[in-house]
Amino acid sequence: MPDVDWDGLRTAAVDIMQRAYAPYSRFKVGVAGLVDDGRIVVGCNVENAAYGVGLCAECGMVSQLHATGGGRLVAVACVDANGDPLMPCGRCRQLLWENGGATCLVATPQGVLPMTEVLPQAFDVADLVHVTGEDL
């Protein structure tokens, strides 16, 4: 298991959660991820009056990951407005798998789990290669 400062990740997630834009649900979410080069990337949810186009916190974090140089997520902490661990939604689990892979660790309400337990039988590039026969 990589050396992860889980308290520091949670603090970063709580800090960014305070900036969430959630006027409709009032359900603020913050997330922080440790990148394989040591950077911390963060994101918060951003709602919209057209509910379906709201952005989850993990979307913002993954955008920041790529905007600041890319890399792979090693560990992720997602929190609610109380600062408690929050399980990412299905869409966001897929984002975490794509950008962290099977060994990425996630702080969940049940403790720290690898993505293989958070998203068992995940769909990824191997499935695309299997069907298309092309390296992507």
Image: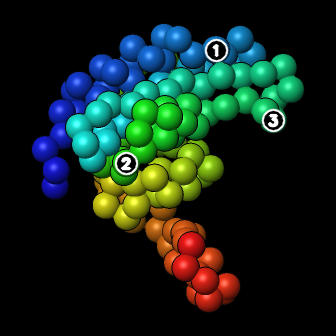
Label 3, on which residue? 52
Do we see residue 78 in this rendering? no
* x, y percent for residue 18: 48, 11
Residue 53, compared with residue 105, is above or below; it is above
Secondary element type, mark 3: helix
Q: Which label belongs to residue 71?
A: 2
Which image quarter is the C terminus in? bottom right
Contact between marks 3 and 2 (CB within 8 A): the answer is: no
Do we see residue 100 in this rendering? yes
Residue 61, compared with residue 96, is above or below; it is above
**Label 3 environment density (alpha carbons within 10 Å; few <14, some 14–19, many ≥20):** few
Query: Gap in Å between the C-alphas at discs 3 and 1?
Result: 15 Å
Label 1, on which residue? 21
Residue 36, compared with residue 60, is above or below; it is below
Q: Which of the two discs, 1 and 2, sits closer to the camera?
A: 2
Contact between marks 1 and 2 (CB within 8 A): the answer is: no
Which residue: 62% across, 77% down? 128
Left or right position of 116 against 5: right
Which residue: 18% across, 33% down? 5
Sequence-wise, the earlier of marks 3 and 2 is: 3
Query: Gap in Å between the C-alphas at discs 1 and 2?
Result: 27 Å
Which residue: 55% across, 31% down? 60
Q: Amino acid at mark 1?
A: Tyr
* x, y percent for residue 77: 36, 35
Q: Amino acid at mark 3?
A: Gly
Task: Please tell me which residue lies in front, 58 or 110.
Answer: 58
* x, y percent for residue 72: 36, 51
Q: Amino acid at mark 2?
A: Gly
Sequence-wise, the earlier of marks 1 and 2 is: 1
When asked about the image quadrant of residue 28, the answer is top right
Left or right position of 13 against 53: left
